[in-house]
Image (spheres, rainbow, N blue to C red):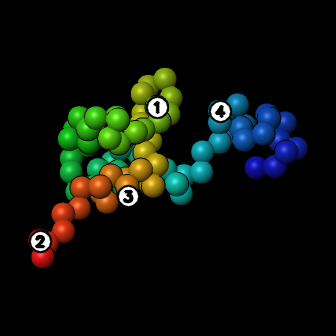
Amino acid sequence: MTDDNPYGPYRDRIGRPYVDNSKWLNTTEAAMELGISVNALKKVDPGKLPYYVFNERGDRRYRRSSIEAFIEARMVTAAE
């Protein structure tokens, strides 16, 4: 998107904020990355795995970096 966008900077043609989808995952994609069900993902505390509510319907988007950090924080290493 450029600054000459008639709908404003970082907005799509109907005025919604532009979201770079390469950095965001929908609920199904996030669940697949984590290896859990969508229902299990929705039960994860937002303080541990934050998400963005995408529209009035309540669709969630998860940052790819948040998913990676969530996985990294829960990795178990072998005892020496």
Ranked by sequence position, the earlier of labels 3 and 2 is 3
From the top left corner, tell me how far across and down residue 18 is, in percent: 65, 42
Find the distance from the CA under tag 1 to the CA under tag 4. Answer: 13 Å
Q: Which residue occupies the extreme front position in the image?
A: 80
Find the distance from the CA under tag 3 to the CA under tag 4. Answer: 27 Å
Which label lies toward us, 1 or 3?
3
Which label lies toward us, 1 or 2?
2
Instruction: Tell me the crowding category of disc 3: few under 14, some 14 to 19, or many 20 or more residues within 10 angstroms, Cα based.
Output: few
Mark 3, secondary structure of its residue? helix
Mark 1, secondary structure of its residue? strand
Determine the residue positioned at 59% across, 51% down: 20
- Residue 68, numbered label: 3
Q: Which residue occupies the extreme bottom position in the image?
A: 80
Instruction: Tell me the crowding category of disc 4: few under 14, some 14 to 19, or many 20 or more residues within 10 angstroms, Cα based.
Output: few
Instruction: Tell me the crowding category of disc 1: few under 14, some 14 to 19, or many 20 or more residues within 10 angstroms, Cα based.
Output: few
Residue 29 lies, with reference to residue 44, above or below; the image says: below
- Residue 11, numbered label: none
- Residue 16, numbered label: 4
* Amino acid type at image mark 3: Glu
Q: Are marks 1 and 2 in contact (CB under 8 Å)?
A: no
Find the distance from the CA under tag 1 to the CA under tag 2. Answer: 40 Å
From the top left corner, tell me how far across and down residue 44 is, in percent: 26, 38
Res. 29 in view: no
> Would you name the residue on which mark 2 appears?
79
Determine the residue positioned at 45% across, 55% down: 65
Ranked by sequence position, the earlier of labels 1 and 4 is 4
> Would you name the residue on which mark 1 appears?
53
Residue nearest the observer in this picture, 62 or 5: 62
* Amino acid type at image mark 1: Val
In the picture, measured across the screen, residue 13 lies left or right of residue 3, that is left
